[in-house]
Image (cartoon, rainbow, N blue to C red):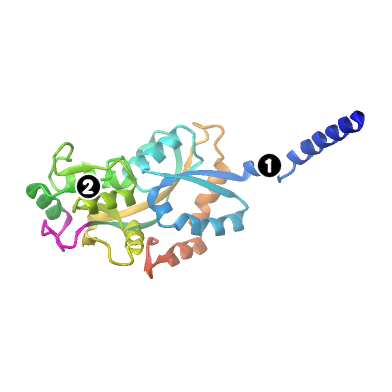
Amino acid sequence: MKRNLFIASLTMIAALFILSATPLFAADAKLLRMATTTSTDDTGLLDYLKTYFVKETGIDIQWVATGTGKALKLGENCDADVLLVHAPDAEKKFVAAGFGLDRNVVMYNDFVLIGPASDPAGVKGKGVKECLNTISAKKIKFVSRGDKSGTHQAEQILWKASGLPVPDKETWYAQAGQGMLTTIQMAAEQNGYTLTDRGTYIKYEDTMKGNPPLKILVEGDDLLKNIYSVIVVNPAKCPKVKADLAKAFSDWMSKPSTKNLISDFKLSGKQLFFISGK
């Protein structure tokens, strides 16, 4: 009896060794790790695209959604194979430092300034510079992402472009240190203003049944364009990075059929992301 159990155990171990060499157990070799910004995740875009990507390429994909600053750091630390981010200046520095390859601009939407429907700052319809100067002068509550995300970096650029120092410890200025949806909720609770990408705002609007307490007050300014890029993490810096899978994803994001998928992605009938030239 013991001899039979021993033989059965050896047979099972041998079978496991054989199976582990098959594609079924080598799935990790086809697993792409991505670090991305919260807006691509919160809006549902990545879940939507993943189905098509996996079907067309046979490559599985998993992602961590965080601020762009943290996503770039994950790439720098070799904890991701590919990045999908939206802070052009930081991205260019990342590539220039040798951490990334082939920065591929794939889509855009825009940032919008949102605030209470009552608009206590009186900035509705004004330009970004006038809006921020008014908020600063009147000391109206403003809630920042405060997390080095692409949106946070864009906000800092807008304060400087408005001729103002970037707020820090001012009593009217709060730093959430959180994702975009949480930051919007904090701004709503404090009857304040914040900067968000339009895609996340549409998601927020949808969760509030089309009647959110915070409304879009400033939009359409040339300073508010929000560009998303794919960056392959450099295998010269990170030898274990799956650069071939990352390149396959970057190329796939630029395919005409994928561009159509991105353009067709809507929430409450509203398009969230756009392709350059469309």
Bounds of the magenta segment: 114-128
Residue 205: x and y in percent read 32, 62
Pointers 1 and 2 in contact (C-beta within 8 Å):
no
Q: Does the magenta stretch include residue 47?
A: no
Give the residue displayed 39% in from the left and 49% down from the top. Answer: 38
Q: Which amino acid does label 2 sit on?
A: Val
Q: Which residue is label 2 attached to? A: 143
Q: Earlier in the sequence, mark 1 or mark 2?
A: 1
Pointer 2 local density, CA inside 10 Å: few below 14, some 14–19, many at least 20: many
Q: Which amino acid does label 1 sit on?
A: Ala
Give the residue displayed 74% in from the left and 43% down from the top. Answer: 22
Residue occupying the far front of the picture:
1
Residue 78: x and y in percent read 49, 33
Residue 163: x and y in percent read 12, 45
Give the residue displayed 28% in from the left and 66% down from the top. Answer: 211
Image quadrant for the N terminus?
top right
Q: Which residue is label 1 attached to? A: 26
